[in-house]
Image (cartoon, rainbow, N blue to C red):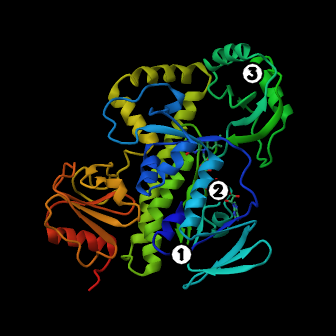
Amino acid sequence: MLAAELRLHDVRVLVLEKETEPASAVRIVGLHIRSLELMAMRGLLERILPHGRKRPASAYFAAIPKPAPPGLDSRYAYLLGIRQPVIERLLEEHAVELGARVRRGCAVAGFEQDDEGVIVELADGERLRSRYLVGCDGARSTVRKLLGVGFPGEPARTESLMGEMEVGAPPEEIAAAVAEIRETHQRFWLRPAGVGVYSVLVPAAGVSDRAEPPTLEDFKQQLHAIAGTDFGVHSPRWLSRFGDATRLADRYRVGRVLLAGDAAHIHPPIGGQGLNLGVQDAVNLGWKLAAQIDGWAPGALLDTYQAERRPVAEEVLDNTRAQTELLATEPGPQAVRRMLTELMDFDEVNLHLLKKITAIGIRYDFGAGPDLLGRRLRDVDVKQGHLYGLLHRGRGLLLDRTERLTVAGWSDRVDHLADSTAALDAPCVLLRPDGHVAWVGDDQQDLDDRLHRWFGKPTP
Ligand SMILES: Cc1cc2nc3c(=O)[nH]c(=O)nc-3n(C[C@H](O)[C@H](O)[C@H](O)COP(=O)(O)OP(=O)(O)OC[C@H]3O[C@@H](n4cnc5c(N)ncnc54)[C@H](O)[C@@H]3O)c2cc1C
């Protein structure tokens, strides 16, 4: 995603991936509303939708089933379930079409930075020079470790085993056992996942720090321990384990090296937010880094990446901590869970939690101003169709209902749509390339100040 965002601004990008082949663990991830909006903003949604399954929007908070409350202000108010290798492939294709280069089988082993750039050393000794380096290298990030950036938080307390395999027991027997066990164990399922294949999730016996996958025997043991039978599981397609460690990088940037995605934050997968969070990091960072490289970034623009995104991750870590407590099988947490389930019948509570999980409630701190300032703008109707259709190039946009303002001086970075009919409760808004509202008003001088702040000096 970051590579594609950078390419929209003509930055030369090289993606280094240590694996020679895409990952084999084909877990399904859920893309939530804000990520779907971002995909629509970049013209990617049409490409992605046929590969996923739409499910109704819902908070999915601690796996408490509640329909979405009324009043969701998004054109993309659903969850899209999609296999992670598929979304990764689609994003890679998009980046490559835009001109990014991807080299597989290249592990970053070291780097040095100076005032001009970064020299990256690969495991085979090859050295590459670039102006910036972004570590999008996951939870065990080599880049983060080499930077010496702290990753404080809590180690895993529990681990889960997850995989796909064939099952000997009849479907009715499985369904009945699963329904009974899930009344108390939320970290447990056997779900059909294709012809004759089941997706299996079961708590692990303990916590191990092993990176290698579990064995079928581990699954059998744990199924026995929880269900009293192993359901005759055999012929695994893939097996994996994951824990509930929760950690946040102290810093997202040291000089010319930055961190994004799981390299910057990890948390339990409950609520399905990790990949979403990383995609949103990328869209926040892309245009800022491109502006820095292009030379027009105002002084502190690149540092707003950490200032804006780290608090968002902090909040996600917190909501996953809360959700994890609600999955515990002891009577106390179960009682809190029942109480929260009742509270979620109040639409405001339900909406509050849903906004957290789907990331549509985020408001960056852009200073004092109307409520819309700092928030994402929904995909409003404009005379050409939908607003998001005008954001595919990743530029800023002035949506001008007064039809008398101008972005002259910044028109190489910011588009102008004069449209008195736009379905908006404000005279004009200035959107950043990530779709967040950088200004609301109707005064040209005021607008010029904001253009200056976010898009640098005007071109004479
Ligand atoms: C069971 C489970 C379910 C989940 N469900 C969801 C969900 O529904 N929704 C959601 O949003 N998220 C979900 N997640 C989280 C999601 O999978 C992660 O947050 C996401 O994969 C993070 O993406 P990333 O690109 O930051 O890191 P990764 O996916 O870890 O990618 C990092 C890449 O860097 C490469 N790499 C590592 N080191 C180096 C190196 N030294 N040099 C070169 N390359 C390197 C790796 O090979 C890897 O390809 C789930 C996670 C789990 C475990």
Alpha carbon distance from label 3 to label 1: 50 Å
Task: Kindly identify which residue carries mark 2.
Answer: 138
> Residue at horizontal 42%, vertical 81%?
295
Query: Label 3 is placed on what type of residue?
Result: Ile
Label 2 CB, ligand 1: below 8 Å? yes
Q: Which mark is residue 287?
A: none
Task: Kindly identify which residue carries mark 1.
Answer: 255
* Residue 236 locus on image (x, y percent): 81, 35
240 and 9: which one is in front? 9
Q: Earlier in the sequence, mark 3 or mark 2?
A: 2
Q: Residue 226 carries which label?
A: 3
* Residue 48 locus on image (x, y percent): 53, 48
Q: In this view, does 153 lie to the left or right of 427?
A: right
> Residue at horizontal 66%, vertical 60%?
141
Q: Which residue lies furthest to the right in this view?
A: 217
Whether label 1 touches label 2, CB < 8 Å = no
Q: Nearer the viewer, mark 1 or mark 2?
A: 2
Query: Label 1 is placed on what type of residue?
Result: Gly
Q: Is residue 333 above or below residue 100?
A: above
Q: Can residue 324 be seen in this view?
A: yes
Query: Label 2 is placed on what type of residue?
Result: Gly
**Quarter of the figure with the C terminus:** bottom left
Q: In this view, does 88 lie above or below 214?
A: below
187 and 416: which one is in front? 416
Figure quadrant of residue 116:
bottom right
Q: Earlier in the sequence, mark 1 or mark 2?
A: 2
Alpha carbon distance from label 3 to label 2: 31 Å
